[in-house]
Amino acid sequence: MAVIQFINGINETVIPSIKLTRSRDGSTGTATFRFNNPDIINPNMQEKGDIKGMYLIDEEGQLVTTDVNAKFINGKPQGIECIYIIKSPAEWDRFMRFMERYANNNDLSFTKA
């Protein structure tokens, strides 16, 4: 089990594109998640609660970022971009374990730049 949530208890079903960057020494990195028309920006989701962050949840626990931004086109929400900062090699390993589970659950593959 590996899911992404913006509101506690509500799984996001739209699969994001994810871009990873890592420092040369491998000690830090970033993961940028881009969701096009995610469930959470649907008008009927407004009464479910406010977006307080992006929660990456698996059997080990959860990883959280509050760097969540909505993208608007002609005044209508079209997407969400989230940035998860990885601050240590241990955090990188933990993030990659989550991503492996998430990829397996959603039939995703990794493409090296």
Image: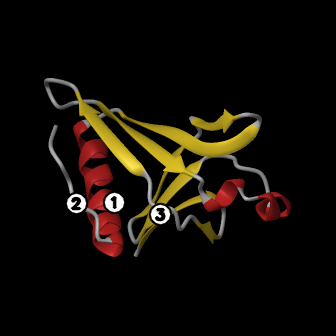
User: Where residue 22 sits in the image (x, y, percent)?
Assistant: 23, 31
Mark carried by residue 73: none
Give me the C-alpha separation between circle 1 and circle 3.
8 Å
Residue under the image location 38 percent in, 66 percent down: 60
Q: How is the model colour-coded?
A: secondary structure
Residue that carries the numbered disc 1 in the rendered image: 98
Q: Give the residue at mark 2.
A: 109
Please tell me whether mark 2 or mark 3 is closer to you in this view: 2
Q: Residue 76: image x %, image y %?
A: 74, 42
Looking at the rendered image, the quarter that the N terminus falls into is: bottom left
Q: Nearer the viewer, mark 2 or mark 1?
A: 2
Circles 2, 3 touching at the beta carbon (< 8 Å):
no
Where 80 falls versus 7 (above or below)?
above
Q: Which residue lies under the disc numbered 3?
A: 57
Disc 1 secondary structure class: helix
What amino acid type is highlighted by mark number 2? Answer: Ser
Q: Amino acid at mark 3?
A: Ile
When asked about the image quadrant of residue 48, the answer is bottom right
* Mark with earlier residue (2, 3): 3
Q: Is residue 74 above or below residue 78?
A: above
The residue tagged with tag 2: helix, strand or loop?
Answer: loop
